[in-house]
């Protein structure tokens, strides 16, 4: 599926009638769901176009709040390993609504990032604390 991002060369294979994608961040094969496709492409954009080192990007970092486990899709760290950004990815068929924004906001209350983003691969909204939480792509 073509997304509203530059095209990247991902390593994809078919295994037991199921497509899988190799995750460069986690160094493992994952079932190629629409959400995983968005996650991989957003991460590739952050690495290849924004300039974040691959080693400072973490997928689905587990957080525990009041006994509830949460996993932001993408967490980006700065050179001192302080959280710089958080991205919540959804399938291209999921609308980026207030519910999705609230979800990334819950992660941000814990991680306190410089910027947060939501993407369904077709639309992307990134908000920066440096710009008064206005919409913009993150800058490295």
Image (cartoon, rainbow, N blue to C red):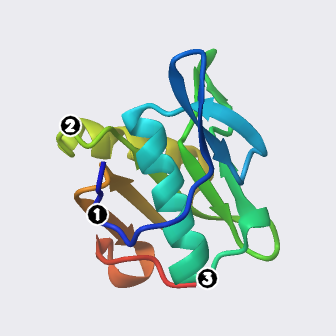
Please tell me which residue is depicted at 63% across the width and 62% down the height of the picture: 76
Q: Are marks 3 and 1 in contact (CB under 8 Å)?
A: no
Q: Is residue 76 above or below residue 67?
A: below
**Location of mark 1 (residue):** 125
Q: Which mark is residue 93?
A: 2
Tell me: 48 left or right of 77: left
Name the residue nearer the viewer: 4 or 123. Answer: 4
Name the residue nearer the viewer: 109 or 138. Answer: 138
**Location of mark 3 (residue):** 51
Q: Mark 3 or mark 2, which is nearer the start of the sequence? A: 3
Tell me: 25 left or right of 37: right
- Give residue 57's quadrant in the image: bottom right
Compute the Cα span from label 2 to label 3.
28 Å
Measured as percent of width and height from the top left, residue 37 is found at: 45, 45
Compute the Cα span from label 3 to label 1.
18 Å
Compute the Cα span from label 1 to label 2.
16 Å
Measured as percent of width and height from the top left, residue 8 is found at: 50, 66
Measured as percent of width and height from the top left, residue 100 is found at: 29, 40
Callout 3 crowding tier (Cα within 10 Å): few <14, some 14–19, many ≥20: few
Callout 1 crowding tier (Cα within 10 Å): few <14, some 14–19, many ≥20: some
Q: Visible in this render: residue 114? A: no
Q: Quadrant of the C terminus?
A: bottom right
Query: Closer to the camera: disc 3 or disc 1?
Result: 3
Name the residue nearer the viewer: 78 or 40. Answer: 40
Please tell me which residue is depicted at 72% across the width and 52% down the height of the picture: 25
Which secondary structure lies at badge 2?
A: loop
Q: Is residue 2 above or below residue 28?
A: below
Measured as percent of width and height from the top left, residue 66 is found at: 60, 20
């Amino acid at each position: 599926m073509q997304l509203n991002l530059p095209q990247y060369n991902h390593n994809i294979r078919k295994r037991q009638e199921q497509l899988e994608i190799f995750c460069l961040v986690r160094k493992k094969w994952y079932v190629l769901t629409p959400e995983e496709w968005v996650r991989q492409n957003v991460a590739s954009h952050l690495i290849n176009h924004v300039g974040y080192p691959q080693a400072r990007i973490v997928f689905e970092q587990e957080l525990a709040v009041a006994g509830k486990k949460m996993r932001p899709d993408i967490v980006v760290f700065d050179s001192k390993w302080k959280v710089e950004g958080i991205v919540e990815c959804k399938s291209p068929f999921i609308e980026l609504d207030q519910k999705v924004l609230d979800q990334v906001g819950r992660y941000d209350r814990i991680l306190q990032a410089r910027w947060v983003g939501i993407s369904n691969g077709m639309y992307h909204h990134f908000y920066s604390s440096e710009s008064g939480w206005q919409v913009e792509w993150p800058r490295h």
